[in-house]
Amino acid sequence: MTMNSRKMRILEAIVNDYIALAEPIGSRTIAKKYDFGLSSATIRNEMSDLEGMGYITAPHASSGRIPSDAGYRLYVDRVMKRRRLSREEKSLLVRALQREEGQARSLIKEMARAVALITNYTIVATEPVNDAHKIKLIQVVVVDGPVVALVLITDLNVAKNQVVVLPKAPGHSVAARLSTALTAMLSGSAAHDLGGLYNDMARHHFREMGLDEAYVDPLLAAIQAALRTADSSEIYTIGMKNILDFPEFADLQKARAIVGRLEEKEGLLGLMAQCCDEIGIIIGAENEDSTLKECSIIRAKISINGQPCGNIAIIGPTRMDYAQVVAVLQATL
Amino acid sequence: MTMNSRKMRILEAIVNDYIALAEPIGSRTIAKKYDFGLSSATIRNEMSDLEGMGYITAPHASSGRIPSDAGYRLYVDRVMKRRRLSREEKSLLVRALQREEGQARSLIKEMARAVALITNYTIVATEPVNDAHKIKLIQVVVVDGPVVALVLITDLNVAKNQVVVLPKAPGHSVAARLSTALTAMLSGSAAHDLGGLYNDMARHHFREMGLDEAYVDPLLAAIQAALRTADSSEIYTIGMKNILDFPEFADLQKARAIVGRLEEKEGLLGLMAQCCDEIGIIIGAENEDSTLKECSIIRAKISINGQPCGNIAIIGPTRMDYAQVVAVLQATL
DNA sequence: GTTAGCACTCACATGTTGAGAGTGCTAACA
DNA sequence: TGTTAGCACTCTCAACATGTGAGTGCTAAC
């Protein structure tokens, strides 16, 4: 009972057919459809071996076979052929890229939308996580009397702002001095650096510079808030309906479980955090999360011109079209 | 066959029981459960009348009755009793309010999350729509050589920013003059005012002030982009899974349709645009959208201390607990 | 090593039956 | 005239039986 290329070809046929039809594949079907020059009986013997090796299973005693997780894994790692994208698929991707050229915030969203449209799977996408934004520059802009806008620019050149109502209206020159003082004091700090100690220090500084101490608390609070929003990465789920269209989720219990899972943004973040530069494939029970035991996930970091623009994960049934999804993701890398 | 208070009481009993049990209610059930001092036969006659008037229907010839859309309408308008919130319900709402005190952006989100938790329905929420942001102040902050942050403050004191790479690094004094020039030129304009004409005008202005014309295009583009993000209102859908838990959506076709509908952000915006200050109730087929013909929607504008903080819509089966949802919404108004 | 043949298994669709819940109608009663 | 008891009827639903078709495993022959 040793693996050989004939068994491989049969496994490939089973996987391909099962991906397309979602129904157990029998030996006779393969014998008729593929021109292996083998009778159904021979194929039956080979399938029996493949079952013994754990690559396929029978859902019940007298049915055709379906690939097991191990079967998909073998298929993905050794059998699957790289596929080219069709013209329509390509043009959908290109159009998504054009739609929000340069706006990192929604580029990944547009990409995800396009991938959902092409593949008909469910897509989860996140902005690139920058949990290490450091303050580079702070500017206080007078808006209207005591109302000021605090503008914070991080070392990654992301600007964040917060509108703050100060206890006293600062003039333009005071605002300028506040900007200088805050920048000098805080540049290089990250969100986790800013603790309670800073308030005392800042008060001391402000006193020395002849600035009103009352400004300290609201401004520092705003800075923390601004940094926090810089860190919090949005997470999008697109095409949740798509996964419900697959017969493996025709069971309402499963449908509910998966919809619930895809709604928990916090839980999904863990999934997305592990995206690597290469395309990663998780098949069925390889998933840590038991809700996703019947799903496969293909995920990767997406970069445009070397600039990381977010992570993307394609979620479908284990019987998903791995070759297509990989092709789409490779086109976007 | 005229409406009277006895019929009303029977209708109320049917609606209440059906909301709780999701099963057709028979005359005997009512006779036993409620102490109307009537036999099941009498109630049968009254129910027959109610059916004739269109307030209840029988799903099939020999089953109990369920309220029709008209029945729910009558119930909501004339029969339903105002309910008080329980302590737990109240504390959930209060905690949501506390969580993001003052941050309009996520307050409505926190509210929606709390309402979803309390009611177990699906919630759609939007930020308040401000399609009339006007520019009040523009500031160009030098970040790093040619990289500047454009900060735009609107008449509603909302600050927006965009990072722009200019063709040439402006010094701090040039940045200050750019700020003054742009503010003078554009203050009072809204997004829809900024057309192609502005570019020519701005170039002329810049020339007069001795500023490099090359700054015009990137800056104006950034301003438009900033205004656009001020206008685009996010839309959140929370608790999509909840609606799948109701037996009326146990049919996969319906489940898919409703999930698909709730994913289309654009379509939902139309729904949300019509929120009024009072609580509005749309029952079943009163919905324009046929996908929602078996749903009811309760929606309202939400304000905190007179400050509009967004719109919220609660979506459930027509058999939804109108009294509870109304009580929750009234507590938030 | 490959194949034909055959008995066997299992899911699934179809048909049957009985129980239960509820109705409509009729006739009797206050 | 409004209310009620009684009864036949209808419809759903679950449980059970049956037949069909696809597919397997095994054996013996090539």
Image (spheres, coloured by chain):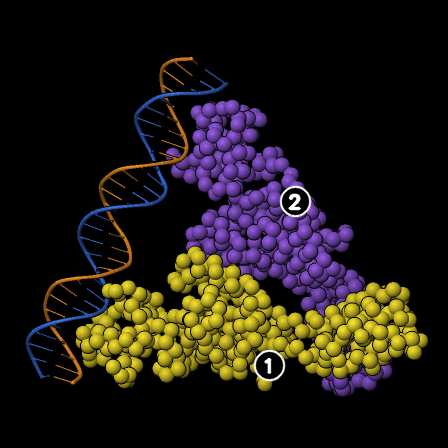
Chain colours: A purple, B yellow, C blue, D orange
The correct choice, above or below, for B188 with respect to A123 in the image is below
The answer to whether residue B154 of the structure is visible from this angle is no
Q: CA distance from mark 2 to mark 1?
A: 48 Å
- Report whether mark 2 lies on the same chain as mark 1: no
User: At numbered mark 1, what does the secondary structure look like: helix, strand or loop?
Assistant: strand
Q: Quadrant of residue B53?
A: bottom left
| Chain containing mark 1 | B
Q: Position of residue B20 (x, y in %)?
A: 35, 70
The correct choice, above or below, for A322 with respect to B24 in the image is above
Residue B14 placement, left or right of A69 = left
For mark 2, does the 10 Å Cα neighbourhood hold few (<14), some (14 to 19), or many (20 or more) residues? Answer: some
- Residue at image position (55%, 79%) is B302
The correct choice, above or below, for B68 with respect to A93 in the image is below
- Residue at image position (24%, 64%) is B62
Residue C21 placement, left or right of B323 = left
- Residue at image position (45%, 75%) is B282
* Nearer to us in this view, B75 or A298: B75
Q: Disc 1 marks which residue?
A: B308
Q: Disc 2 marks which residue?
A: A85
Q: Nearer the viewer, mark 2 or mark 1?
A: 2
Q: Position of residue A298 (x, y in %)?
A: 61, 47
Q: Position of residue A151 (x, y in %)?
A: 77, 73
